Image: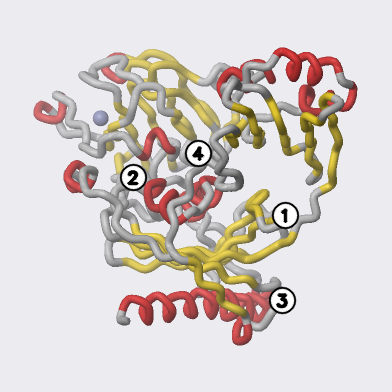
Amino acid sequence: MKWHWMFFAVILPIFILLIILSATPDSEAGNVKLRTITSEVILPFNKAKDHSDEVFWQVDQVRRNDTLGKLFDRMGVHDNDAKKFLTLSSDSKAINTQLIPGRTLEIKTDADGKLLYLEYELRDDNILVAGLTPSGYQIAQQKLILEQQQVIKSATIINSLFGATDDAGIPDQIALQIASIFSGVIDFNQDLRSGDKFNVLYEAFYNAGELMKTGKVLAVEFLSNGKLRKAIHFGDADTKYAYYTPEGENLHKSFLRSPLEFSRVSSSFSRGRYHPILNRIRAHKGVDFAAAHGTRIKASGDGVIKFMGRKGGYGNVVIIKHNNKISTVYGHLARFSKILRRGSEVTQGDIIGYVGKTGLATGPHLHYEFLLNGVHRNPMTVELPSGRPIDPNYKDAFKAKNLELFAKIEMLNRQLSAASSQ
Ligand SMILES: [Zn+2]
């Protein structure tokens, strides 16, 4: 039963402790410097830089199909001079050609919405800076000098993963990486419980003390449902599935525990398990995932689309054949991915469609089946094949890395328990 969530949803987040460990990547675990930062709520859209009543700092991210005009409207910039300058100046071309979703725009305006300062993140660690001077707007590109740090943070889940990561000041990109690293063993949409906790060590890049971007998760330990799971990154930067248990087992599974995309939206959806009427009439052959209408559905493993269309009580359904033994079925979809057809090859994680309530369904949910040799298996508990373990040639290097990274996390644990027993 997943009812716990409804109750926990009303309990406010209580505590967060966070410690930033500043260390160069090659430093010895024994002599790194620990810097303790007192708990502080980080307000995403409000810079503490300038508290004058006259100016307003704002940070926003570019969204899909954004134009500079749309961004300005959203951020309350009402300034035709600035718009004109940024449209006509050849130096500002970069901002118009690089409005890439996820990039950060930071602005300062006065109370009337006049643009005083603008900073935009360009490619290759360049930023575009524009400011109002007595002689009009000036614009320049600057190269950021990025300082790489390893950051360790600890968070306790009260009502959602994002609630916990927000409170601990952990960027979304790191939260999503954690979910992806454990996607073969934990269903982040349904398995998390209040009291679950994790420690994560990740790369972050700073410029003049300000976080510019995050890199990859280096090590993470996740205590969920009383079970402690650890993962460490090993391999070059391009390796897609490079997370292993301390024993050297590959954490990548050939199937996801849940085909629903984990996101801020899905994670805040009610966790009540959906119970369709048909359950009472005949044996239920799959798992029903409650989800908001339109939630994206992923192929749970690599394979070929065997069927994509309407089928009786399933409504809009996708069937993927993964190999000679395993097929998966996704029912009640609102619609399908536009780029896929019967016969298309899919890779694990590809979006195949969107949650709906077509066919025999009283509300939006995903009906998911996992068939092994034509027999229905419980996708939540079936044993899933893993990726390749650590190559024996790298065993020693892996062991050393493992010791180094988890020594840092252990140090954090000791600090936390010392702090809580004081
Ligand atoms: Zn069902």
Residue 26 is tagged as: 3
Label 3 lies in ligand 1 vicinity (Cβ under 8 Å):
no
Residue 34 on image: x %, y %: 56, 77
Q: Can you name the residue that lies furthest to the right here?
A: 90
Question: The residue tagged with tag 4: helix, strand or loop?
Answer: loop
* Closer mark to the observer between disc 2 and disc 3: 3
Q: Are marks 3 and 1 in contact (CB under 8 Å)?
A: no
Q: CA distance from mark 4 to mark 1?
A: 46 Å
Badge 3 or badge 1: first in the primary sequence: 3
Display coloring: secondary structure
Residue 47 in which image quadrant: top right
- Please name the residue that numbered disc 1 is placed on: 207
Are there few (<14), some (14-19), or many (20+) residues within 10 Å of tag 1? few
Distance in Å between CA atoms under marks 4 and 3: 42 Å
Q: Are marks 2 and 1 in contact (CB under 8 Å)?
A: no
Badge 3 marks a residue whose secondary structure is loop
Who comes first in sequence, dot 2 or dot 1? Answer: 1
Q: Which residue is mark 4?
A: 322
Residue at 54% over, 76% down: 408
Q: Which residue is mark 2?
A: 379
| Mark found first going from the N terminus, 4 or 3 | 3
Determine the secondary structure under disc 2.
loop
* Category of crowding for the residue at label 3, using alpha-carbon neighbours closer than 10 angstroms: few (below 14), some (14–19), many (at least 20): few
Q: CA distance from mark 2 to mark 3?
A: 41 Å
Is the residue 307 above or below the residue 236 in the image?
above
In-image side of 263 versus 114 (left or right): left
Please identify the quarter of the rendering in which residue 25 is found.
bottom right
| Residue 213 against residue 81 in the figure, above or below | below
